[in-house]
Image (spheres, rainbow, N blue to C red):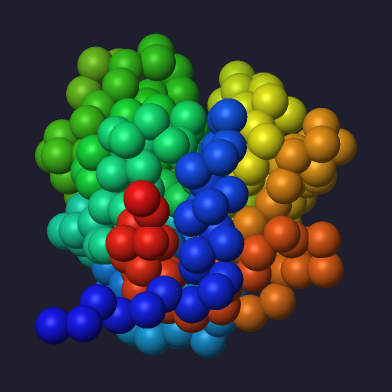
């Protein structure tokens, strides 16, 4: 069997990665699409077709109309909880194991990077892993949240009866300061930022590659569709993220 010849771009990315002192990945919704999680910013299917997440998964809806919020979010918990990592998640975990990747900064809340074995994961939009009581701070694992719903379908704290909120950043909320500070520190120190499956359109995360560039580092992009960094990227791959990253692994020495 002949080994498939990697594209010149994949070879170049493998070379950059192999020579990088500190490479960091930045991932967005596109990395989870092969796992069956649609990117809601593109016209979607099923759950995402009927409602606008930006309207329902909003902090003001959670506060004013928790029944409506949970009618949307409860099935989303269940849907996301069943999903498995794909070859793109696995490739990033493998790069970290080989010492070629310092960390993954992700906009995703689906836990799939950790499930794939990535250890240094910065979740700038939080994660569905836990939900917390806004009154007493009690924390509940995803598996325990289902038992907290009352007759109206609203999650109520088992300790104090307060409102329980997913530990994810809802629309209308600021990003967690500690996670953003860590992401900025990693981006500034990186000499290569590998952006995967993100349109890099939403700030403040969209500003992270700028920090890498400002420090003299390079930016590589593995994303379908345009990004604001296409012109300055050292490498630009536009195929399916799982196929591109699998080819990248194969192209490494
Ligand atoms: Zn409580």
| Apparent side of residue 166 relative to residue 151 in the rendered image (left or right) | right
The one nearer the camera, 86 or 99, is 99
Q: Position of residue 105 (x, y in %)?
A: 52, 39
Q: Give the residue at x 32% y 29%.
A: 119
| Apparent side of residue 85 relative to residue 68 in the rendered image (left or right) | left
The one nearer the camera, 37 or 157, is 37
Q: Give the residue at x 58% y 49%.
A: 16
Q: Give the residue at x 52% y 46%.
A: 17
Find the residue positioned furthest to the front: 2
Q: Position of residue 88 (x, y in %)?
A: 34, 60
Mark yes or no: residue 51 visible: no
| Apparent side of residue 25 relative to residue 33 in the rendered image (left or right) | right
Q: Position of residue 206 (x, y in %)?
A: 73, 51
Mark yes or no: residue 104 visible: yes
Find the residue positioned furthest to the right: 214
Picture layout, residue 199 above or below residue 177: below
Q: How many marks?
A: 0
The one nearer the camera, 197 or 179, is 197
| Apparent side of residue 194 relative to residue 78 in the rendered image (left or right) | right
The one nearer the camera, 11 or 196, is 11
Image quadrant in which the N terminus is located: bottom left
Find the residue positioned furthest to the top: 136
Picture layout, residue 23 above or below residue 66: above
Q: Position of residue 78 (x, y in %)?
A: 21, 58
């Amino acid at each position: 069997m002949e080994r498939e010849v990697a594209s010149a771009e994949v070879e170049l990315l493998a070379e950059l990665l192999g020579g990088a002192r500190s490479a960091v990945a930045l991932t967005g919704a596109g990395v989870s699409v092969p796992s069956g999680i649609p990117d809601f910013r593109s016209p979607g299917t099923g759950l995402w077709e009927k409602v606008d997440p930006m309207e329902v998964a909003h902090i003001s809806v959670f506060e004013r109309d928790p029944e409506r919020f949970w009618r949307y979010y409860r099935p989303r918990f269940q849907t996301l909880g069943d999903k498995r990592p794909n070859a793109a998640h696995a490739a990033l975990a493998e790069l970290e194991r080989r010492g070629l990747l310092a960390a993954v900064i992700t906009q995703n809340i689906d836990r799939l990077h950790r499930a794939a074995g990535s250890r240094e994961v910065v979740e700038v939009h939080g994660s569905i892993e836990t939900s917390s009581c806004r009154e007493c701070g009690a924390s509940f694992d995803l598996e325990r949240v289902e038992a907290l719903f009352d007759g109206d379908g609203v999650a109520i704290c088992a300790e104090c009866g307060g409102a329980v909120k997913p530990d994810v950043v809802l629309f209308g909320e600021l990003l967690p300061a500690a996670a953003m500070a860590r992401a900025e520190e990693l981006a500034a120190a990186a000499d290569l930022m590998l952006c995967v499956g993100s349109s890099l359109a939403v700030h403040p995360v969209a500003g992270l590659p700028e920090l890498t560039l400002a420090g003299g580092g390079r930016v590589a992009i593995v994303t379908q569709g345009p990004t604001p960094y296409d012109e300055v990227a050292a490498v630009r791959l536009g195929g399916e993220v799982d196929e591109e990253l699998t080819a990248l692994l194969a192209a490494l020495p």
